[in-house]
Image: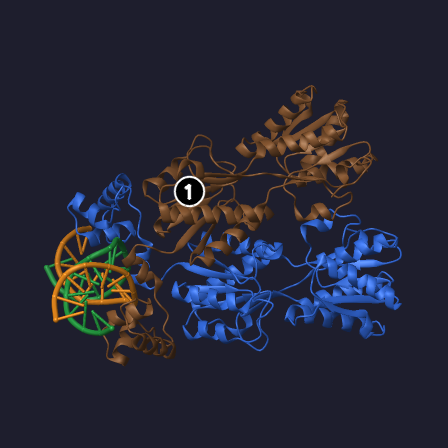
Chain colours: A brown, B blue, C green, D orange
DNA sequence: CTGAAAGCGCTAACAG
DNA sequence: CTGTTAGCGCTTTCAG
């Protein structure tokens, strides 16, 4: 009932408490008999190693902090799932913090991690984050840091990302090859590398295939279903012609589809739509939604693996510092004029 | 760069290190001047309070463990989102552990939490969990424990749940009132309280409205889209008549809908379908899916609030030990013969 | 193979 | 208002 320590076990067995400590940590210089005796009485007394004392002494907490905008978002919950599973297998626990897309919260999270003496931090920055100050503090304290997906430009930190440029390019190219010519792109108004890269891919794909880049076909807003609907209405009202949409993520694409349906436009015959993220619902909606898969689970696993390497080797050779996963094109009904391929 | 402690600050200012400690903790018996001086040099030296040392000494970690089957599942990520937001506001950090629906992992998680000396544990049990042994260990160690959603029967622990019985009843009653008479229920083959309660609600609703309870209209399987499809095929093959489905969760309902569509049956005119959970896709699919909302965010916030009370008062009066949220009926197209209400 | 002893950085009496 | 002191429960030398 009352907390039992190695001292209690030591007394019970007439051993020095340091011997007990070694036995519990499976130290090679302890006899099998002693180890077994110690383990048995530990179990009998209901002993639980005090990791806090252990951490204080050893300087290792076996905890890594994970900082994400919001665990509520499928993408992040999926990546965190992957990270936790891998880190857990390697004896690490996860301290979770949500920035709620706010720099202030993000800094609070970093402060908490620093105070908790986490062994490392894995983060994906908030939409508001513009400079690296808080993250530099992490480095100043010699705490390993890695980014996934959303990272800061001009700030050298190991990371796992997907190639958003290729993603944007592939999505757009797919539309072009399906015969669409007047392709609208909907992006975020806040400037985040992943979004600007997708847009850059869109622009370059148009360029490569000799299609004009019309500024009025690039819409910026707050990402949401509603902004997708609004986009379609706006273009229609302004009389701007279109025959396809590439949106920065899937929810916006759904908004586009809903509005197009409401207007009686046929998808994919008259208008093609492709999203980005491969949300669970892409396969369930009608028409099923073409999109770009971000390999979320793999991203989580990769960043965990990368991180374990950093924890071991401290400094990584430059060629191993950045893992860039290829985005996967998922062709579904919403862009399949004629034939349908999944 | 090297770790700075209160001792460093004390030296710098010619103070006793305990004075520095008090100043940093905003102790009332310290002069304003001293506090300010301490804070300034703390900032200047880049001091970060060592929470580990603090926890060891005070016996409080300000960390709560959250044990969930998988953060990957919308329901859980949403609840965890709510929990983290609230606990964070009250100065607690979250240690996250996934049981992956396995008892073994669940026990490992509990062990980790115990070792980490968390101040409390909030859990939702795995599908495999059948007895309370591991959770009793938590109580034996005097660590506050609360369940949300999935809990053990015959094991008295504070909890926040929704009334699954009412949920099942409401869903079924809704189908009956819409004129459906041959209602199939699909449930989980593994025995979990939340699922058996939903089923009990289904049975009682049929009974109340004088409809026969046919065992062959109750299907048990592994929850999945595929099992939904399979269910429809099976019933059809066996020649068992039906005009509506109430499934234990939304994915299974989607399977049912997909198979019905493939068979050319009209929804909701010929067959009505209602799910459970109110997943994000319910509003996006065609037809939109009627379902029962579980108030996930609210559940997270409520369990966090309940937990803060436990941490404060240790023992809760019985009438406050269990919060049961009402399930919310969401009527959408999949059950709306004639008129459509959202 | 086992024991003795120091100390990680902080909290919280107790003293002044 | 500030200083002194004794640990929290472990890890880790250094001795035997």
| Residue with the mark numbered 1 | A107
> Residue B256's x, y, as percent?
79, 58
> Residue A226's x, y, as percent?
69, 38
- From the viewer's perspective, is A170 left or right of B289? left
Where A182 falls versus B232 (above or below)?
above
Out of A167 and A45, give the one closest to the viewer: A167
- From the viewer's perspective, is A5 left or right of B338? left
Where A287 falls versus A236 (above or below)?
below
> Residue A193's x, y, as percent?
53, 32
- From the viewer's perspective, is A227 left or right of D12? right
Rendered residue at 77%/55% (across/down): B331
- From the viewer's perspective, is A327 left or right of A16? right
Q: Is residue A321 visible?
A: no
Rendered residue at 45%/46% (across/down): A306
Q: Is residue A155 visible?
A: yes
Of helix, strand and loop, which one carries label 1? helix
């Amino acid at each position: 009932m009352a907390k039992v320590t190695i001292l209690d076990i030591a007394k019970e067995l007439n051993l020095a408490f340091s011997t007990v400590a070694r036995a519990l940590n499976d130290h090679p210089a302890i006899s099998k008999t002693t180890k077994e005796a110690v383990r048995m009485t530990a179990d009998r007394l209901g002993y639980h190693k005090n990791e806090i004392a252990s951490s204080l002494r050893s300087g290792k907490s076996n905890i890594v902090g994970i900082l994400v905008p919001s665990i509520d978002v499928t993408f992040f919950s999926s990546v965190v799932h992957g990270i936790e599973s891998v880190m857990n297998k390697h004896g690490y626990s996860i301290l979770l913090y949500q920035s709620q897309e706010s720099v202030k919260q993000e800094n609070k999270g970093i402060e908490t991690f620093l105070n908790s003496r986490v062994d490392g931090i894995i983060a994906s920055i908030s939409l508001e984050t513009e400079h690296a100050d808080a993250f530099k503090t992490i480095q100043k304290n010699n705490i390993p840091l890695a980014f996934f997906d959303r990272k800061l430009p001009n700030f050298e930190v190991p990371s796992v990302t997907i190639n958003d440029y290729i993603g944007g390019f592939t999505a757009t190219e797919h539309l072009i090859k399906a015969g669409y010519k007047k392709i609208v792109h909907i992006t975020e108004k806040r400037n985040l590398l992943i979004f600007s890269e997708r847009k850059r891919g869109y622009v370059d794909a148009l360029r490569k295939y000799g299609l004009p880049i019309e500024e009025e076909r690039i819409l910026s807003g707050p990402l949401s279903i509603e902004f997708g609907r609004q986009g379609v209405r706006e273009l229609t009202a302004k009389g701007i012609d279109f025959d396809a949409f590439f949106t920065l993520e899937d929810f916006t694409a759904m908004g586009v589809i809903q509005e197009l349906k409401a207007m009686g436009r046929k998808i994919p015959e008259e208008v093609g739509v492709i999203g980005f993220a491969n949300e669970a619902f892409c396969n369930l909606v009608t028409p099923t939604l073409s999109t770009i898969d971000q390999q979320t689970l793999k991203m989580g696993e990769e960043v965990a693996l990368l991180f374990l390497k950093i924890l071991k080797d401290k400094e990584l050779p430059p060629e191993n510092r950045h893992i860039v996963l290829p985005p996967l094109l998922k062709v579904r009904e919403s862009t399949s004029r004629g034939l349908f391929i999944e």
